[in-house]
Image: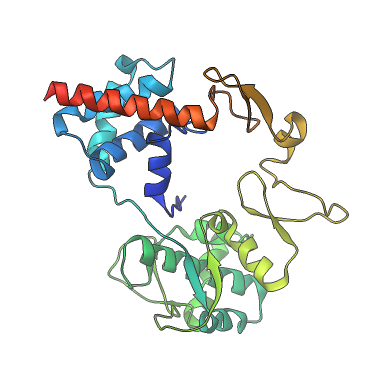
Amino acid sequence: MINFKFNEERDIRNVVEFGNVNSLSIHKAIWNAALYYTQIEPVDKKNIFNTVVKFMEQHYSDFKYEGYVRAINKCINDVKKYRIKNIDSIKITKSEMNKIQSLNDIKKEKIAFVVLALAKYFNAAYENEKDNFYAKISEIFKFARISIPVRERDYYLRFAYEEGILKPNYSIGNNAYTAAFVSHNDEEIVLELNESDYLEIAYTYLNYKNGGYKRCKACGRWFKVSVGKPNEQYCYLHKSTYKSIGEYKTKTCIDCGKDFNVGPMNNRSCRCEECQHEKQLEYQKESMKKIRNVK
């Protein structure tokens, strides 16, 4: 499945500079630290491994680097080839939306919107205007929230070529498509997409077209408001969790003693935002001092 990321540098800085690792697994935290110390605030190549280890030890009390040597080295090697995505938003123009709605078939419209959203995301992520995107056919139908038997999907997608939604391109490999109606002109913008919109691309379009959807308070994805339940606040992924354990819980800062609120799934935070920031600055100063001493 495609992992849609917009302002990755902001998110990586948020993790490493401010220690916001609460929702990250150990492996994802290692990945973020490796990206930070190789591309954003690079340290000497000889010190990357130790710097990542120090970051992990600072924020994960149960972290023992001996069990993650291979994972850390792999991340350090992999991030060298990784392109950090920095996208503000994806803009949909009036002509593009008119083309989609001219299909007058909700299934076709949703597929067309998915094609457009994918092509424009790949254009922005790789800073080109080729209108190519890579996706399995199963992903296209999943993003569009359309249920069609596997054997019939290729045949059904023929309409996209006949209606000028996709155009043939035989030079870009498997699972590769080229959108045929992306506008590269400076024209009226009717919709802007952010990272949360890509969590439910079809619902993003349906909300634009007809309304009736809300953003989940936990993750930001669009969800359909149930009949008779206009006060719903959470998508299907978070509804049961937040209903059973509440919207937040209160903790006491171990440094200043003040109470602060965290999300219901946050079991790591032990400092308020101000004290966490001060602790992170202290950690950074100590880390840089040790790095300089190593040199």
* Closest to the observer, 186 or 125: 186
Horizontal and vertical percent position of residue 284: 32, 29
Horizontal and vertical percent position of residue 41: 26, 41
**193 lies left or right of 221:** left
Q: In the rendered image, which quarter is residue 173 located in?
A: bottom left
Q: Residue at x 28, y 23 (%)?
A: 286
Horizontal and vertical percent position of residue 36: 30, 39
Task: In the displayed orientation, state which residue is furthest to the right.
Answer: 228
Residue 211's place in the image compared with 3, above or below, is: below
Q: In the rendered image, which quarter is residue 290 located in?
A: top left
Q: How many marks?
A: 0
Residue 112 seen in the current view:
yes
Residue 156 seen in the current view:
no
Residue 115's place in the image compared with 236, above or below, is: below
**147 lies left or right of 91:** right
Horizontal and vertical percent position of residue 155: 53, 71
**225 lies left or right of 110:** right
Residue 90's place in the image compared with 214, above or below, is: below
**Quadrant of the drawing holding the C terminus:** top left
Q: Residue at x 62, y 80 (%)?
A: 101
* Closest to the observer, 217 or 77: 217
Task: In the displayed orientation, state which residue is furthest to the left.
Answer: 295
**127 lies left or right of 20:** left
Q: Residue at x 67, y 49 (%)?
A: 216
* Closest to the observer, 243 or 252: 252
* Closest to the observer, 233 or 156: 233
The image's colouring method is rainbow
Q: Residue at x 49, y 66 (%)?
A: 117
Q: In the rendered image, which quarter is residue 166 located in?
A: bottom left
